[in-house]
Amino acid sequence: MERMSRRRLMATSATASIAAAIVGGSSVMAQPGQPLDTKWLLNLEFTFDPRTLDQGRTGAPLATPVPGPVYLAGTLYDSGSLNADGTVKSDAVVRGNHRFAGWLYDPAAMMVAGVHTFDIFGRGKLVVTGASDALNAPVAGGTGEFKFVQGEARVGIINRTNLAYQLVLELNGGSTGM
């Protein structure tokens, strides 16, 4: 068996380490499916269907809302799909569904606290928690394309009487390695 000098052994080890670092680093970076840090905005509008207002868990809407538990559902549209009075334009594009479950604490102003679920067709769901008096709330989580997102939901009032709102979602993607 041939004897290798210490100097040659160290040179061979160093070369192999450098080569492994170069090859290993590039193969890790090239792996598909790793989430990237991203930031994006979604501009949507939504309305609630007053017929879905349920406060007694009976499935029957109340004529006049009262303080207490509340459930509402509605439709998500592209930005610009609703008129100033909250009615839907004829060329509106439906993007998904919106559901709210929570507590109505000021019926006159429709002030609520609870959980909003925005189901965006073909992309996933976003969950937002908070109170309506602030009109800004954190994004608590999501599914599908929104699996690792964090961010903020900002709600603007288009027409409170017709339950029409503007929604801006400022989202940060998941961190690398999640």
Image (cartoon, helix red, strand yellow):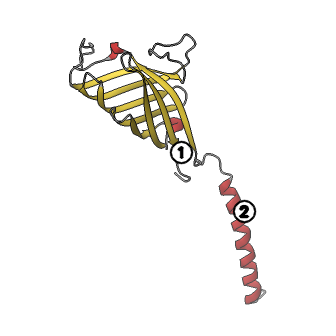
Return the disc, 1 or 2, that comes first in the chain's sequence: 2
* 115 to 23, vertically: above or below: above
In depth, the one of 111 and 9 nearer the eye is 111
**Picture quarter with the N terminus:** bottom right
Which residue occupies the extreme front position in the image?
Answer: 84
For label 2, count other residues whose C-alpha is less than 10 Å away and answer few (under 14), some (14-19) or many (20+). Answer: few
Disc 1 vs disc 2: Cβ atoms closer than 8 Å? Answer: no
In depth, the one of 16 and 157 nearer the eye is 157
State the residue at coordinates (34%, 33%): 115
From the top left corner, tell me how far across and down residue 140 is, in percent.
40, 41
State the residue at coordinates (25%, 11%): 63
Q: Quick one: SS at disc 2?
A: helix
In depth, the one of 34 and 90 nearer the eye is 90
From the top left corner, tell me how far across and down residue 13 is, in percent.
71, 78
Q: Which residue is mark 1?
A: 173
Q: Quick one: SS at disc 1?
A: loop
Amino acid type, label 1: Gly
Q: Quick check: 33 left or right of 82? A: right
From the top left corner, tell me how far across and down residue 156 is, in percent.
43, 29
Cα distance between the residues tagged 1 and 2: 28 Å
Regarding residue 4, the answer to whether it shows in the image is: no
State the residue at coordinates (55%, 15%): 92
* 153 to 70, vertically: above or below: below
Q: Nearer the viewer, mark 1 or mark 2?
A: 1
Q: Quadrant of residue 153?
A: top left
Q: Quick check: 65 left or right of 171? A: left
Q: Which residue is mark 2?
A: 23
Amino acid type, label 2: Val
